[in-house]
């Protein structure tokens, strides 16, 4: 018998989850001393901000429909 897929919706939207992730990661990076771990965490913050910006642009109402 196959497993049933979990079909619950996340409580927060993607934009809200990305914003929360970047805020939490930035706060964690502030508590770390300069080094590779902090650099990696700050890179994840930049990636999360870029993903949030892409999601915002793609979900904007002014975007033309693909043909």
Image: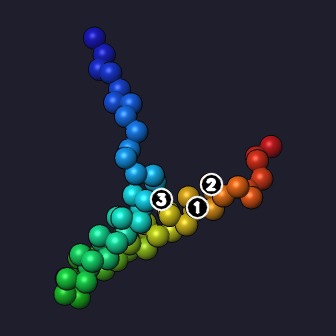
Which colour assignment does the render follow? rainbow
Q: Which residue is mark 2?
A: 59
Residue at the image point whose x is 34% and y is 64% from the top: 21
Residue of label 3 = 15
Near-viewer residue (25 or 44):
25
Q: Name the foreground residue: 41 vs 28.
A: 28
Going from the N terminus, do you reach mark 1 or mark 3 first?
Answer: 3
Evaluate if marks 1 and 3 touch, with contact meaning CB atoms under 8 Å apart: yes
Label 1: which secondary element: helix
Residue 35 visible (yes or no)? no
- Mark 1 crowd level (few <14, some 14–19, many ≥20, 10 Å Cα): few
Tell me if residue 25 comes above or below residue 33 in the rendering. Answer: above
In the picture provided, is 46 more to the left or to the right than 4? right
Residue 39 vs 52, above or below: the answer is: below
1 and 2 marks in contact (CB < 8 Å): yes
Residue 42: image quadrant is: bottom left
């Amino acid at each position: 018998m196959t497993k049933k897929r979990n079909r619950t919706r996340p409580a927060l939207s993607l934009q809200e989850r990305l914003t929360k992730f970047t805020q939490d990661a930035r706060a964690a990076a502030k508590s770390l001393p300069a080094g590779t771990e902090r650099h990696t965490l700050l890179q994840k913050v930049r990636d999360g901000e870029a993903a949030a910006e892409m999601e915002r642009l793609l979900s904007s109402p002014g975007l033309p429909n693909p043909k």
